[in-house]
Amino acid sequence: MTAVIDQPVEPATSAKSVRPPGRWAAPPRPTWEEEPGKVGLAGKGLVLTLACLAILFPLWIVLVTSLSSRKTIDQAGGLVMVPKGITFVAYKELLSGGQVTRAAIISVLITVVGTLFSMAVSVLCAYGLSRIGSLGHRWILMMMLATMFFSAGLIPTYLLVQSLGLTDSYLALILPSALSVFNILVLRGFFMGISQELIDSARIDGAGDFRILWVIVMPLSRAVLAVITLFYAVGYWSAWFNASLYLNDQDMMPLQNVMIQLVQKQEAPVGLGQAIKTGELSGLAVQMAVMVMALLPVAVLSPFVQRHFKKGMLTGAVKG
Amino acid sequence: MSHSTVPRSRTEADTTGKTPEASGGATGSRQNKPKAKVSWRLRFRRDRVLLLMTLPAVLLILVFNYLPILGNIVAFEDYDPYVSDNGIVSMLHSPWVGLENFQLIFADSSFWNAVQNTLVLFFLQLILFFPIPILLALLINSVVRPRVRALSQAILYLPHFFSWVLVIAVFQQLLGGAGLFSQLLRQHGFDGLDVMTDPNTFKFLITAQSVWKDAGWGIIVFLAALSSVSPDLYEAAAMDGAGRWRRMWHVTLPALRPVIALLLVLRVGDALTVGFEQILLQRDAVGPGAAEVLDTFVWWNGVRNQDFGYAAAAGLVKGVISLGLVLAANKVAHLMGEQGVYKK
Amino acid sequence: MTPNASAASAPSRRSFLASTAVVAAAVAGGVPLLSACGASDSGSGGGSSEGKGVKKLLPAFVASNVVTPDIASKNGSSIGFTSKLDLAGLKTSVPKKLGKGGKVSIMSPFWGSPPKSDNAYYKAMNSLIGVDVTWQNQDGNTYDQKLGAVLASSDIPDIVVVPSWNMGGKIPSAIIGKFADLGPYLAGDKVKDYPNLAAIPTDAWQRCIFGGKLRGLPMPSSYVPNIVPLYRKDIFDKEGYEVPTSADEFMALAKEITNAKAKRWACLDMKWIAFNMWGVLSGSEKSLGWNLVDGKLVNRVETQEYLEALEWTRKLFAAGYVHPDAKLGKSAATDPGPKFAAGEFLIYPQDISQWWSRTAEQATQNPSYKIWGMDLFGHDGGDPTLWAGSPAGIFAFISKKASASVIHDALSVANVTAAPYGTKEYMLTNYGVEGTHYTVKNGVPTKTDQGNNEVINAYVMVASPASTIAHPDFPEVAKAQVEWQQRMGAFTKKSSFYGQQITEPSRYTNLSNDFEQLEDDITRGRKKISDMQQAVSDWKSKGGDQLRAWYQKLLDDNGTAAS
């Protein structure tokens, strides 16, 4: 590209954009990449749009139903597609009483502590198993793999937790389900891809395995660490069965259990001194409201998680 | 990240010029020391920190997985948890029946029906479900605008957080006999849809529901793998004259190969688990002939009646077969040059 | 392909919507819809609660004379109350506090959010009874699993509530092994220390005998079949539909009503009504499916009527008169309430309690809505032959390890919760503290928000008075319900093993597992009647005949309460 001195070189973008690029715009294309074909772009756009619509439409139904009164729901015969008036009575039902706030705090604490614990143990273990040829790693791997296929029955697990004195303790919600072998395997897979030369050179520099893990391996594995942290966090957040099994004190219940109970309350059997749902409140609306509230944390946290999935974020020699 | 500048050029010196064949098997096996005749003690000294790292996990698994798994001994008993004061003691006091539970299982024709349904569903999901997250990941990865990427990703994995009860209710609302599409069809003189209760299309329905609910979630692992591909590789390939599709073939897909191999092997090992709650909820809609899979069979015949011996026996059968499948699949992965779950 | 972090085997979350129908049935009327709740025990050969020695074990019956019902029980119906509530005129049935101030822990299923442990309702109840009760309210839908696990451990609460639909598998063996014999406290005249317990019908007590000893505290229910064909009377009146009186008339009516294009179908799955139309023996408990016919014991699946009822139901489905959602079966069934209110179908079979609960739900929002119950009829238009259900549905047991004073305290709790309608104790148990938990206007008590949050489940699970129907807000519905039961009760016969608590030997547990499935397969056209006939003959050869012999022996040894 020869620069002609007396003619101002127009920046490549000025012809195309009259206004500064908005937040939705594409970043400038790297020089080596071709322009996308129109057909390809349209095709991609179509597929993506269809996929998103297929999900947004049911989501819409859930949202609308959660905001519908009993009358609207009865007229629609169940799930509502076209809104007729908005009422927050289902959400009021869920949020009044203070149980939900308390349970939410409990869930957040369990998720944070549990995820940190699980990640710490998993990352250590995954790295410890990732160096080929290290002593005994195959045995340990086999031993872990076996637990993926053989599971214990409910009663032996309950008896174990009970005899360890963990009933009515939050440890029962963390320890028994702290590790997912699947997650460890995924971590290990990524760790194994880190070049041996890097590690060797660090070793030559005198670094021990802990240091290598902390200083070299982990920074290079940001994406997979983010993913597995996400998996564990979601696991802890959505777990409810262990709480109902091991906790007898209702004041200790985490969020999912409280949500399920609130839905149950609407569909509870008559004759046990139950409340009849008179007025505007519909059990179905409560169920949908619970669902919407379950999605809120996901929607809120998404941006944080996705920062780690930016294109080409990870530099460095990760082979496969 | 000052470290990265040094290694990057070194690896790139390795990979530019030849087709980047990012197969983990080829590179990971080099060790610090020559392979031959390294004594036990030396290896222990070298690797003891690594072993230490695995210790917490091993302890947790031994205590919370292996101890209760020993409880599967009830598969060989007519287990009555209440015969003694303590369920564990009862395990030792219940009458021993040897292989009787297993015989009962294998003699039951509905067991074989369940096995058949399970395998058919597995293959169906392998072909129709497994590739979809990969394709979607590639699609999203190729979207340049970050906001569009982030938004579509977020939307796609939302259904993962729906409960199956809700998913089925929504499907029923749209595709059921009294649902939206059925009513539309009836307005125009056709019959309503029957997909939610048709035993013949049931397996496709299940697969479709799984895709709707979980495909978006499955994208995540693949996106992580894709995002770890350095853009310099693409640039280098483009410099060599590779067009869009060739870049995908030579850079993108190889980056995904190990992850796909790992997940595929694990999926095969999991072949006998094709869903539980989703199928249990719809079992009545199409009848057990079409719907019964191994997990629901065990639940129906064992857990529901608190026949834990029976359930444990079925679990053992399933576990042994699954383990065999994983080992076989791993072998196949090795033959194709991939790590799989572990390498020899 | 979703990885999850939990290593413990986490069983599924079954639809709570479906299970509530089961619970409603057991609580308000008697028997759940699931047929596999017959108990079966482990090593020993099972047993029955009938028998010559039984009379000694049972508490004496002393009818309560504290309150007189507006409608007395007739033909096995519940007792009915239709008058307004007179707060000032409430009687008391517990003149003296029986509790000694001890601590009692109770584990019970709970549907909804359990209130904080120190709430006003629990406090008021505890102070009335004189006992310090600690509640362990457990998720009602996964209760069977928790129950199984807790009973297997060595740490059992003082009182454990076990509903009859959780009595499957090895639970009866647990009951025999882990729970106390209450005979020394309640048999014969000893029950007179607890007058409200003495007023519980003897039939209900007989159901509490496990392993030859009286162990449970019952929640009595009417033995009249509890499933009523409920219909939209307002729409019937508007369209001029007439209530059918024979199977053919029903079919014709269904045809008239159904108009799929207009999004209206006639009914839901009417299988249970069909069974009633053809006089098929009760399928709600295994032992109720047997009856002595011409000197030989016959099981319900062997009868011709069983097949005919299924065939009729199959025709109903095949003709398209059944709402498509009903085909989803019970596990994925959503609450039919909204669709019923929308008029998408006009008839459905459900527990009798919904006659009132639907009315109450719709009263304010939709005044023209009227739900009513059809009388059951014979398939040919004549009188129906109905078979009695079970006289008690939910039981509370006391741990064997409990000391005598704990048992005494537990019985004090039961004495209060079993107080009859119209007493102060009943109001406190079911409605809470006046002013705090409920208000009374024009003789109709209405729960406040606090009442709805705190006064649910819990104490009523311990023991209850004889089956009562009382709805001060809709007395005409209460009257209709009781009179329905009285009319149907006149046609209700008791089968050979009525009222007995029978545990079949464990080798027969799975024997009739498949019948309910097969019934649904046939009615929905996936299988044929001939498949059922094949299944029945398989059943006979694989153990049905031996089971027959086992039951015959029981009959010979113990006699029967059949009518």
Image (spheres, rainbow, N blue to C red):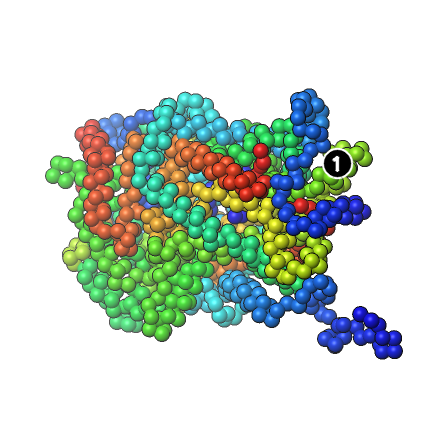
B152 and B77: which one is in front? B152
A241 and C423: which one is in front? A241
Residue C535 pos. (x, y %): 23, 43
Residue at position x 38%, y 67% in the image: B182
Res. A132 image quadrant: top right
Residue at position x 62%, y 28% in the image: A136
A22 and B281: which one is in front? A22
Residue B87 pos. (x, y %): 45, 27
Residue B146 relative to residue C64: left or right: right
B324 and A10: which one is in front? A10
Subunit ID for the residue under disc 1: A
Establish if C190 lies above or below A51: above
Residue A243, visible in the rendered structure: no
Quarter holding the C terminus of chain C is top left
Residue C418 pos. (x, y %): 39, 41
Establish if C443 lies above or below A250: below
Res. C98 image quadrant: top left
Residue C549, visible in the rendered structure: yes
Residue A62 pos. (x, y %): 51, 61
Q: Label 1 is placed on what type of residue?
A: Asp
User: In the current view of this chain or complex, which residue is farthest to the bottom?
Assistant: A7
Determine which residue is flagged by label 1. A200
Establish if C145 lies above or below C453: above
The mark tally for this picture is 1
Residue at position x 51%, y 40% in the image: B332
Residue A178 relative to residue C346: left or right: right
User: In the current view of this chain or complex, which residue is farthest to the right?
Assistant: A6
Residue at position x 44%, y 27% in the image: B73
Residue C331 relative to residue C55: left or right: right
- Name the element at disc 1: helix
Residue A138 relative to residue C14: left or right: right
